[in-house]
Image (cartoon, rainbow, N blue to C red):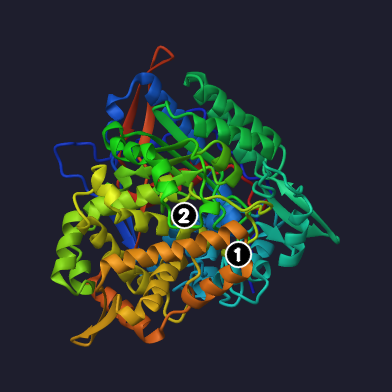
């Protein structure tokens, strides 16, 4: 039974972003801007997560025009926050808004264990953009009871604050979201890529509704034209729905699905275009036209213009982009990153870009699948100014876009390494005791300490700049043939490219590493992570589901298996603890090359069965005894395996109606930022 709550059924009031709200003043109080004080990197931790801040060095030295451009792009970025919540699960917004209504109004006992558990659950929902883990994909298990939720928290929440829009009544709202939260068998996983099941029926993401895997694959297969050299990424910006026996797309566009949020995004993009210079101004306006029409041909036009613009100092990602959240690897999650170039650090990636053709020509793959001419490869090191959508709070450290293979082939790709994010990770992780616990040999720890940051950044550079942009498909292969295995195999391909070349003498020749020791540091760390330490991120008894984790396990386990006769990689027991060590780094590099040959072949030929077999054999299952050992040892260190960030705050400074500056502040309260975003940047209906 649900509490008898009377609620006014009225449409949720839309917030406006045209003025700075009073909440800014509240947040500013907690901002740490005294540069004389030591910057506090970590500001919160809960469950398996720690929340960090990142600095934006160089912002103050930007021109006023550049600062203003960042401000408008920042507003466009955070205006899309609700979209990802909804894409991740149909009822995420209803759950988040209900939890926030409770959190901001409850006046009962906030010291009891169940309230603390409720607070932790809400923090996890904010961090994951929904009720499923951001990396592991399994649904969160609340540590407070359903009785406490309904009988105490809901019963003491003002009825008019519950998000009944689309549900009709509080009873119907609660009848939907309560089992979604508490029934362990309902909506178990956001993303399932298991072999032998209908991955759409098994997954709880909100990209499909009422559609089987076979129906979805058939629907999109009909759209492709044979031998089309410039295929559209059909389905990237839509939800596929079956209703009354008919299958159709709900397109993300103004006037379509997610219109209210897209209208806000477009408003700020048009403001950004007003201060941007050509060619960036035209590029932004093309993105605006795409959002207005939903026409994916315009999105391709935008991507071509974006990848060709290598001169603009301020840059951004904004759109339905990465497809890791779709088990079929088709639908784009909404994300945005606003950034500017780190000119000094970019000299490193420029050297890589300048040698892109050499790397392609010497790649250890079938020559038929090498690009005869590498076009438009650009790479830079950037400073992130804003993270949003699928890049917030948890964010990548490198990006390679566009994703369309034909655009990469004909126009190239743009790759970035996000230096201020890697710096924040490094600073916050000092003194954790992780290396001492899991790295057996002193010489490996010494190399990691000496070359770890360099080798991490270079591996990211190579992965993003050259790995994703390398190779080509065989004639008549469109790129979607690998289905649910495509993301894992593509990440493996890029990682292998980076690992192989990190140890190439060419890297010493062009001055990027002092010796092979830098590669040794990365190889030892990578194999240990793939075969062991990344399991700290997975609940005991679960399989590996996330594509990047599968990729790392795939590479490490394949190399272990194929190098076993030569003892290239070895399991060692010492004092009852398990360690994985690399005995032959040169031979391991050769194995990376051999595996890259096969993974490139699988992609180039669209060999689904070979892709399925290699992933299922090496990338999915975890030995339960090893898993438990790793979890126990990691728990003793009292550190969290996942990190994410809160954003700086940007405020326009105006005099006589004219912008004269943009102020940056660094808030240090995770809860306040999440509530502020929900209050001021939540534009979508509760049900979409």
Q: Residue at x 36, y 51 (%)?
A: 460
The residue lying toward the viewer, choosing from 418 and 256, is: 418
Residue 644 visible, this orientation: yes
The reply, left or right, for residue 659 in relation to residue 344 is right
Instruction: Give the structural element (helix, strand or loop) at label 2.
Output: helix
Q: Residue at x 32, y 38 (%)?
A: 351
Q: Residue at x 50, y 19 (%)?
A: 278
x, y percentage for residue 42?
Answer: 26, 53
x, y percentage for residue 208?
Answer: 69, 59
| Spatial CA span between label 1 and label 2 | 43 Å
Density class for disc 2 (Cα within 10 Å; few <14, some 14-19, many ≥20) is few
Q: Which residue is mark 1?
A: 484
The residue lying toward the viewer, choosing from 482 and 592, is: 592
Q: Is residue 307 above or below residue 220?
A: above
Camera-near label (1 vs 2) is 1
x, y percentage for residue 588?
Answer: 32, 68
The reply, left or right, for residue 338 in relation to residue 447 is right
Density class for disc 1 (Cα within 10 Å; few <14, some 14-19, many ≥20) is many
Q: Which mark is residue 101?
A: none
């Amino acid at each position: 039974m649900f509490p008898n709550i009377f609620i006014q059924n009225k449409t949720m009031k839309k917030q406006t972003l045209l003025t700075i709200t009073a909440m800014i003043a509240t947040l500013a109080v907690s901002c740490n801007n005294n540069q004389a004080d030591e910057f506090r990197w970590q500001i919160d931790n809960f469950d398996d997560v720690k929340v960090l801040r990142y600095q934006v060095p160089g912002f103050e030295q930007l021109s006023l025009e550049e600062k203003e451009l960042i401000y408008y792009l920042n507003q466009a970025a955070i205006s899309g926050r609700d979209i990802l919540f909804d894409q991740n699960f149909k009822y995420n917004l209803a759950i988040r808004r209900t939890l926030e209504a409770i959190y901001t109004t409850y006046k009962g006992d906030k010291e009891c264990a169940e309230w603390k558990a409720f607070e932790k659950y809400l923090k996890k929902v904010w961090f994951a953009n929904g009720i499923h883990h951001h990396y592991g994909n399994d649904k969160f298990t609340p540590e407070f009871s359903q009785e406490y939720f309904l009988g105490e928290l809901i019963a003491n929440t003002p009825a008019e604050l519950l998000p009944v829009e689309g549900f009709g009544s509080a009873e119907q709202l609660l009848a939907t979201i309560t089992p979604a939260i508490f029934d362990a068998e309902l909506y178990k996983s956001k993303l399932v890529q298991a072999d032998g099941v209908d991955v759409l029926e098994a997954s709880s993401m909100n990209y499909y509704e009422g559609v089987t895997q076979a129906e979805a694959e058939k629907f999109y297969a009909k759209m492709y034209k044979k031998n089309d050299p410039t295929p559209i990424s059909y389905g990237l910006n839509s939800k596929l729905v079956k209703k009354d026996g008919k299958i159709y797309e709900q397109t993300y566009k103004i006037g379509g699905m997610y219109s209210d949020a897209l209208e806000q995004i477009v408003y700020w993009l048009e403001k950004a275009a007003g201060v941007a210079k050509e060619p960036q101004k035209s590029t932004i306006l093309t993105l605006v036209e795409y959002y207005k029409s939903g026409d994916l041909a315009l999105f391709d036009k935008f991507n071509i213009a974006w990848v060709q613009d290598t001169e603009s100092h301020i840059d951004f990602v904004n759109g339905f982009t990465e497809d890791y959240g779709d088990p079929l690897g088709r639908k784009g999650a909404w994300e945005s990153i606003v950034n500017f170039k780190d000119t000094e650090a970019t000299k490193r990636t420029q050297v890589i870009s300048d040698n892109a053709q050499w790397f392609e020509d010497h790649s250890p793959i079938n020559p038929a699948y090498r690009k005869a001419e590498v076009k438009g490869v650009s790479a830079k090191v950037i400073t992130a100014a804003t993270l949003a959508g699928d890049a917030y709070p948890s964010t990548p450290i490198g990006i390679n876009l566009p994703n369309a293979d034909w655009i990469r082939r004909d126009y190239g790709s743009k790759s970035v390494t996000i230096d201020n994010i890697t710096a924040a990770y490094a600073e916050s992780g000092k003194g954790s005791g992780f290396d001492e616990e899991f790295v057996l040999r002193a010489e490996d720890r010494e190399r990691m300490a000496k070359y770890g940051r360099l080798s991490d950044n270079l591996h990211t550079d190579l992965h993003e700049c050259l790995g994703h942009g390398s190779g080509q498909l065989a004639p008549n292969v469109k790129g979607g043939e690998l289905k649910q295995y495509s993301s894992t195999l593509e990440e493996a391909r890029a990682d292998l490219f980076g690992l192989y070349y990190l140890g190439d003498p060419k890297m010493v020749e062009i001055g990027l590493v002092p010796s092979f020791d830098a590669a040794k540091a990365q190889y030892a760390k990578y194999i240990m992570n793939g075969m062991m330490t990344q399991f700290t991120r997975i609940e005991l008894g679960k399989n590996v589901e996330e594509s990047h984790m599968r990729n790392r396990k795939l590479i490490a386990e394949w190399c272990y298996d194929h190098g076993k006769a030569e003892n290239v990689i070895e399991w060692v027991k010492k004092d009852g603890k398990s360690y994985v060590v690399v005995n032959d780094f040169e031979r391991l590099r050769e194995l990376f090359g051999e595996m890259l040959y096969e993974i490139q072949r699988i992609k180039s030929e669209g060999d689904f069965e070979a892709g399925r077999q290699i992933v299922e054999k090496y990338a999915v299952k975890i030995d339960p005894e090893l898993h438990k050992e790793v979890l126990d040892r990691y728990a003793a260190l009292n550190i969290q395996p996942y990190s994410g960030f809160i954003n700086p705050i940007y405020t326009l400074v105006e005099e006589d109606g004219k912008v004269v500056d943009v102020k940056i502040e660094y808030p240090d309260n995770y809860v306040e930022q999440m509530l502020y975003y929900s209050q001021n940047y939540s534009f979508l209906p509760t049900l979409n």
